[in-house]
Image: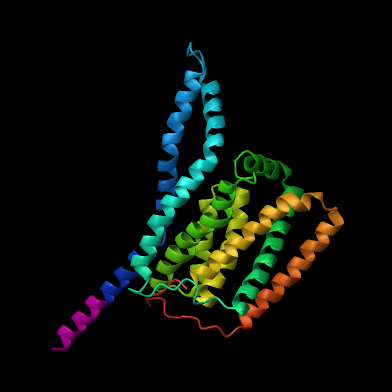
């Protein structure tokens, strides 16, 4: 009898171990799925670009390099539409996935964790994170100017720097929602559900977030941003507050890329120093705040 109990206990332990391993591996699937959706969204526009470039040369006398350059330029023109279509499709896919995996039936509450205090703390921390990211970018520009020059060229030709409504929707609204569902919602959720404690889960999802951006400079500061938002996700058990953090960060980034360019460098430094102090104060307030944290990783979560 005792032997049977030991065998059953051993089987349950093995099953639990397998469950945790599979759940851990699931944390990487949302990133792969996001990249697949991006690729599938780009393919029709790539074909359109190829036919458009080939059609512009009646004699089909374009060299391979000329064809590739023409296609690249056409795709840059389509980039904003690709981003919006990708974001809409990804939102539907990842929201339904997150809802099915982590939300109790009938318990969707997007603003449960919102309060004047939590919003102010997130605002302060977002300001500080942006100031820290600006310091990182300034350091890269100083020590690795070629890398920064290539990055600036990439951003300028991305089609996401104008002031159009589509750009606003993509960069400020739906983009942050999708990325938070993918990384702080699904990836972080599965990592915690696999039994990982908060710190390694925050770091892993942040690294995945950095990898998703597919270039060194943006990947570096996206990892920093991912750690900051990941801590907010852990502290308040809220994906929605993470979305707010991400939106605020992108607003600060868009504003500094335009309005601050016309401000004297000394005043820019002062502004970033003030933002840094505000951010440190916000981090201290969040750390000291006694907001409830769901410590059990395997507990079903809600969007709050």
Decide if residue 155 is in sight here. Answer: yes
Q: State which quadrant residue 290 falls in.
A: bottom right
Which percent across, then down, holds residue 2?
Answer: 17, 89
| Picture residue at 58% right of the left edge, 78% below the top | 115
| Picture residue at 59% right of the left edge, 66% below the top | 245
| Picture residue at 56% right of the left edge, 35% below the top | 77
Q: How many marks?
A: 0
Rendered position, 19 above or below 77: below
Quadrant containing the N terminus in the rendered view: bottom left
Q: State which quadrant residue 266 falls in.
A: bottom right
Q: Is residue 303 left or right of residue 158?
A: left
Is residue 51 part of the magenta span, yes or no? no
Q: Nearer the viewer, residue 185 or 296?
A: 185
Is residue 3 part of the magenta span, yes or no? yes
Q: Nearer the viewer, residue 7 or 295?
A: 295
Which percent across, then down, holds residue 102?
Answer: 37, 70
Rendered position, 104 above or below 249: below
Identify the residue at the far top of this view: 59
Q: Nearer the viewer, residue 200 or 291?
A: 291
Q: State which quadrant residue 15 falls in.
A: bottom left
Identify the residue at the far front of this view: 165
Which percent across, then down, holds residue 119?
Answer: 61, 73
Q: Which residues are magenta?
A: 1-12
Q: Main secondary structure of the magenta part?
A: helix
Q: Is residue 106 left or right of residue 239?
A: left
């Amino acid at each position: 009898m005792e032997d049977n109990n030991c065998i059953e206990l051993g089987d349950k332990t093995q099953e639990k171990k397998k469950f945790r391993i599979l759940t851990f591996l699931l944390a990487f699937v949302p990133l792969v799925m996001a990249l697949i959706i991006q690729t599938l969204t780009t393919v029709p526009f790539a074909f359109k670009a190829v036919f458009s470039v080939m059609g512009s040369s009646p004699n089909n006398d374009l060299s391979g390099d000329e064809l590739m350059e023409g296609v690249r330029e056409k795709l840059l023109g389509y980039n904003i539409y690709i981003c919006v279509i990708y974001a809409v499709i990804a939102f539907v896919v990842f929201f339904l996935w997150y809802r099915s995996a982590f939300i109790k039936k009938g318990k969707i509450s997007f603003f449960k964790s919102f309060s004047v205090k939590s919003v102010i703390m997130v605002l302060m921390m977002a300001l500080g994170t942006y100031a820290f990211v600006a310091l990182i970018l300034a350091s890269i520009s100083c020590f690795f100017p070629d890398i920064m020059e290539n990055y600036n060229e990439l951003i300028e030709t991305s089609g996401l720097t104008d002031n159009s409504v589509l750009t606003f929707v993509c960069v400020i609204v739906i983009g942050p929602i999708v990325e938070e569902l993918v990384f702080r919602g699904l990836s972080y959720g599965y990592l915690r559900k696999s039994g990982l404690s908060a710190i390694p889960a925050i770091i892993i999802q942040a690294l995945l977030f950095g990898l998703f951006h597919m270039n060194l400079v943006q990947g570096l500061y996206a990892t920093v941003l991912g750690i900051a938002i990941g801590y907010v996700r852990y502290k308040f058990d809220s994906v929605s507050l993470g979305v707010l953090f991400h939106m605020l960060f992108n607003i600060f980034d868009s504003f500094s890329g335009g309005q601050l360019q016309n401000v004297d460098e000394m005043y820019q430094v002062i502004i970033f120093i003030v933002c840094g102090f505000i951010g440190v104060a916000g981090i201290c307030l969040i750390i000291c705040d006694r907001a409830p944290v769901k410590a059990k990783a395997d507990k079903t979560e809600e969007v709050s």
